[in-house]
Amino acid sequence: MTSPDAPSGSPTRTAPRHTAGHPASPPTGTTMTVAVVQAAAPLFDTATGVARVEELTREAVERGARLVVFPEAFLGGYPKGIDFGVTVGSRTPAGRELFRRYHASAVEVPGPEVEAVAAVTRELGCHSVVGAIERQGATLYCVALYFGPQGYLGLHRKLMPTAAERYLWGQGDGSTLPVFDTGSARLGAAICWENYMPLFRTAMYAKGVDLWCAPTVDDRDGWQATMRHIALEGRCFVLSACPHLRRDALPPEVVPVQGDAPDTVLIGGGSVIVSPLGEVLAGPLRDGEGILTATLDLDELARSRFDFDPTGHYSRPDVFTLQVDESARRTVRTAPPEPSPG
């Protein structure tokens, strides 16, 4: 593992200063180099966010990565410490205007921002998982966007926004729980505290996830235990990408509750890559932006599942079963017109 440089202190630098992890190498059929990005894009500046996704994806691929994972809400932004003028039973005009700006900075699917990222993965022949805020009409969703050598593949909408996130984002449904085959391994994602939902995890394990991506903003030390537990429970590689965000990355007129000093850390990182037997392969990364890489031995998947498969030979379907509703939930369903008589 290389020694990380000291943080520059500038939120506007064009590339991360930290690098850590196993040396990158091209895929051979049994190995795959992956990367997790620990960075943040400026709030209310989606164009810069897209540019950063392109730049950081290229940097990761130059290091050998065939899969690049970005943090939660990278496109559209995670407004850590901003209350949007909400108290119980009350909203403010200023808070409504701030939400308007947040709504305007979200991305549409399909849309130009999604196509811009898709063009990069098509060009580079890689896969990526990008956290974003999706705008559908008047409602916002926290999503993980999937991309591959073919371009845009699909998305997962966060099922349960946490605490105050619920006055910003809607809830996803069971229709966006995809797993994608990269040709070498199967790729899936759980966003932030979805990783604490045991039935969600069980449903994804049943889909055969090999590469468990965890875009998050949870920078607590306890998150590391969760990532190692999921790796052991799911017998999968876990790739957790968390931003490193300082107050000076926010517009000057937006003051977070954590403080107004420019170097106040709002989200402290902690990105990590873990093996199917719980070994930390890279990270956790602290104290600044950076890219972690690791070359995964995909044969470890079979080795680890020899004695434990949570929805296979170590399950007891005669005792425990899980029903998953993957239908789309729509408020209005339009029935086709009935044929005219005669």
Image: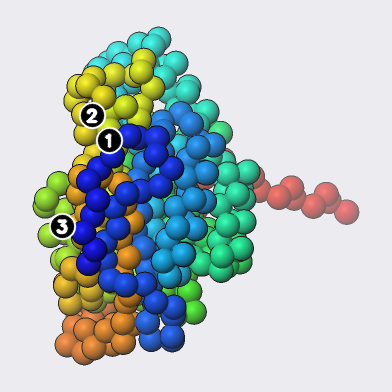
Give the labeled residue for mark 2: 263
Which label belongs to residue 84?
Answer: none
**Mark 2 Cα within 10 Å, few/some/many (few <14, many 20+)?**
some
Q: Which residue lies furthest to the right in this view?
A: 342
User: What amino acid type is highlighted by mark number 3?
Assistant: Gln
Residue 73 visible in image = no
Give the labeled residue for mark 1: 9
Q: Quadrant of the C terminus?
A: bottom right
User: How far separated are the C-alphas under marks 2 and 1?
Assistant: 7 Å
User: What amino acid type is highlighted by mark number 1?
Assistant: Gly
| Residue at x 39%, y 77% (from the top left corner) | 25
User: How far separated are the C-alphas under marks 2 and 3?
Assistant: 25 Å
Side of 326 relative to 278 (left or right):
right
Residue 23: percent from left, percent from top: 32, 72
Closer to us: mark 2 or mark 3?
2
First of labels 1, 3 by sequence position: 1
Residue 186: percent from left, percent from top: 41, 74
Secondary element at tag 1: loop
Asked if labels 1 and 2 touch by Cβ distance under 8 angstroms, the answer is yes
Residue 294: percent from left, percent from top: 31, 70
First of labels 2, 1 by sequence position: 1
| Residue at x 47%, y 45% (from the top left corner) | 52
Q: Quadrant of the N terminus?
A: bottom left
| Residue at x 52%, y 28% (from the top left corner) | 104
